[in-house]
């Protein structure tokens, strides 16, 4: 029985490690000024990844410039107006670069004050 229990425990640990290290990585943090940011990168296909960046708890109607980069290459630049729920968000599917993808997301309030910066490795 102990051997079976140990085998089950090892298989559960191995499954969790594969999930955590592979297909989705998330980070979040506080902005300089109002807001909280959320950055998520997931595997879209064998050759592409999906980057999602969201900033919440903002002032509705403010304009924000949002930028995404992967390994130093800008993959998105967009200006968005904060919606009635107090959030802005962008997403981009881009090619999966060789090695570890170093993803950076930046948001800057262009009608008020505040900025958000998040990074993660995928």
Image (cartoon, rainbow, N blue to C red):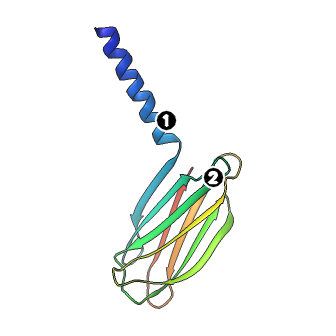
> Secondary structure under badge 1?
helix
Residue tagged by mark 1? Answer: 18
> In this image, 7 relative to 122: left or right?
left
Does 101 sit above or below residue 17? below
Does 27 sit above or below residue 60? above
Residue tagged by mark 2? Answer: 101
Q: Residue at x 29, y 9 (%)?
A: 2
User: Can you say which quadrant of the picture contains the N terminus?
Assistant: top left
Q: Nearer the viewer, residue 20 or 43?
A: 43
Q: Nearer the viewer, residue 7 or 112?
A: 7
- Rendered location of residue 11, percent (x, y): 41, 24
Which of the marked residues, 2 or 1, is nearer the chain's N terminus? 1
- Rendered location of residue 105, percent (x, y): 54, 67
Q: Looking at the rendered structure, which numbered label has been put on residue 120?
A: none
Q: Quadrant of residue 27 in the image?
A: bottom left
Does 119 sit above or below residue 85? above
């Amino acid at each position: 029985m102990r051997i079976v229990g140990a085998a089950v425990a090892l298989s559960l640990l191995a499954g969790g490690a594969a999930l955590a290290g592979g297909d989705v990585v998330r980070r979040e943090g506080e902005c300089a000024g109002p807001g909280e940011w959320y950055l998520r990168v997931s595997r879209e296909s064998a050759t592409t990844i999906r980057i999602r960046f969201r900033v919440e708890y903002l002032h509705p109607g403010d304009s924000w410039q949002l930028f995404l980069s992967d390994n130093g290459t800008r993959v998105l630049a967009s200006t968005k107006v904060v919606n009635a729920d107090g959030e802005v968000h962008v997403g981009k599917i881009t090619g999966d670069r060789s090695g570890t993808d170093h993803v950076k997301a930046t948001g800057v309030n262009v009608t008020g004050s505040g900025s958000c910066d998040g990074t993660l490795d995928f």
